[in-house]
Image (cartoon, rainbow, N blue to C red):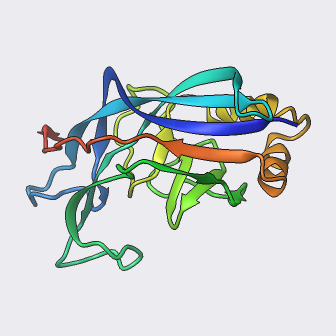
Amino acid sequence: MNIVGLIVTGEQTGSYYWAQSYPSKDRNKNGYIDYYRVPVYKLRINQYDKNWKVTAFRDWTGLRFMPYYNDPKSPNRKYKSRGFLVAGLSNPRRGRVRTYKSDYRIQNTVSPFDGAIVITGAFYIHAGPQKLSDWGWGSAGCVEVIGNFDGYKKDIAALGGVSGNVDDAIAKLVSWKKLYYDFKAATPPKLRVESGH
């Protein structure tokens, strides 16, 4: 059994994704869905030995900051924040993962992938768009992994040295206190409406 670290870097890849604001999609009330160009960030899954030396890793990419708009005049009461903000965790943050939700379903669109790694409160790491050309995902601040999220989970299990069902493997890593997260500092991007469709 190995220690596994989920690294969310502050390093952008140079690629961008066209996202919708969430939970409301038309901030400027012109009758069209608003799209924002958001940066893609580098993610890494590290395997550590007992001395916290990195012994293997896998690289991924994800969406760390996303446009959030909860219409103050007609708010989605599931979310406390009102108005527009760039949602995401920007300060450095490290800790042990205490909860894995294997049955979590994506809230903002349809996804073939389930599961969410809880960081704090309602901030999770979960599935994102499979390709950058899959426009229109939204987020309330979660990190959304780009690509095959089942592959991301398999990498966690493999680096952790746990075989079998990947959801069970991640749950074991959590219960055995072997799964950690490490958010590096990052300045939230300035997002504005780039197009309406």
Q: Residue at x 33, y 45 (%)?
A: 65
Left or right, 22 with reference to 97: left
- Is residue 34 left or right of 130 when viewed as pictured? left
| Residue 121: x %, y % from top left | 52, 67
Quarter of image, res 124:
bottom right
Please provide percent x and percent y for residue 192.
13, 44
* Residue 159: % across, % down: 77, 29
Residue 11 vertical position relative to residue 189 in the rendered view, above or below: above
Q: Residue furthest front?
A: 51
Name the spot of residue 180 as percent of width and height, x first. 65, 46
Left or right of 18? Residue 57 is right
Residue placed most toward the observer, 186 or 138: 186
Corner quadrant of residue 45: top right
Image point (29%, 72%), residue name:
81
Q: Say if 122 sits above or below 196 in the image.
A: below
Q: Quadrant of the C terminus?
A: top left
Q: How many marks?
A: 0
